[in-house]
Image: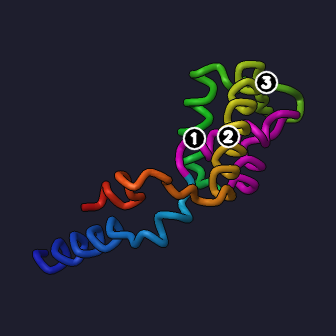
Amino acid sequence: MYLIYHTSVKEHRDMMTTTSEQHKNNRGKIQIMGDVLGLATSGIKKTHIMYRANLSYEQVHLYLGELIGKRLMAQDVSSNGVIYRTTEKGREFLLYYTRLVEFLEEEKQEPKVELSSPYISSRSWTR
């Protein structure tokens, strides 16, 4: 029993340890919310959200619940099943989210500016 417990703790510790390279590729909560809202602008079923947003069943339930709770997404029942649609408030979220992503991409492309003052070096904060 002790050996099994020890192994599962070690496995848990290994799963929790990630390199910075792995962390860079993971999407954050806001990005996933943006992806789901973007998919649902014209209406979409839950399974299609799962596959297109690359989310697990549990993740889809968590995000849909939160998005519906925040009134960013609506759930419509039709003869074809349950359809999820982005609300007007959700479209507003997408507008701000898109602007932020564009702003951050712009920042990546701008060249670094050298400081002209002889009293301030660009690396003075690292000392």
Q: Nearer the viewer, residue 58 or 117?
A: 117
The answer to whether marks 1 and 2 mark residues whose Cβ atoms lie closer than 8 Å is yes
Q: Quadrant of residue 70?
A: top right
Q: Is residue 120 visible?
A: yes
Q: Amino acid at mark 1?
A: Ile
Question: Residue 110 appears at what percent x and percent y?
Answer: 67, 56
Q: Position of residue 105 (x, y in %)?
A: 68, 52
Q: Please, is residue 22 above or below residue 104 in the view?
A: below
Residue identified by numbered label 2: 34
The residue to which callout 3 is attached is 76
Question: What's the residue type where badge 3 is placed?
Answer: Asp
Residue appearing at x 33%, y 69% in the figure? 17
How far apart are the two marked residues, 3 and 2, measured between alpha carbons? Answer: 20 Å
Q: Whole-Å distance between the Cαs marked 3 and 1?
A: 23 Å
Marks 3 and 1, the one that precedes in the sequence:
1
The x and y percentages for residue 91 are: 76, 26
Element class at badge 2: helix
Q: How is the image coloured?
A: rainbow
Q: Residue at 83% of width from left, 33% of height from top?
A: 41
Q: CA distance from mark 1 to mark 2?
A: 6 Å
Secondary structure found at label 3? strand
| 23 left or right of 95 in image | left
- Which residue occupies the extreme left position in the image? 2
Q: Name the one closer to the observer, 120 or 66.
A: 120
Residue placed under numbered mark 1 in the picture:
30
> Mark 1 falls on what kind of element?
helix
Q: Which mark is residue 106?
A: none
> Relative to 86, is 1 on the left or the right?
left
Residue 35 can be seen, yes or no? no
Residue at image position (73%, 24%) is 92
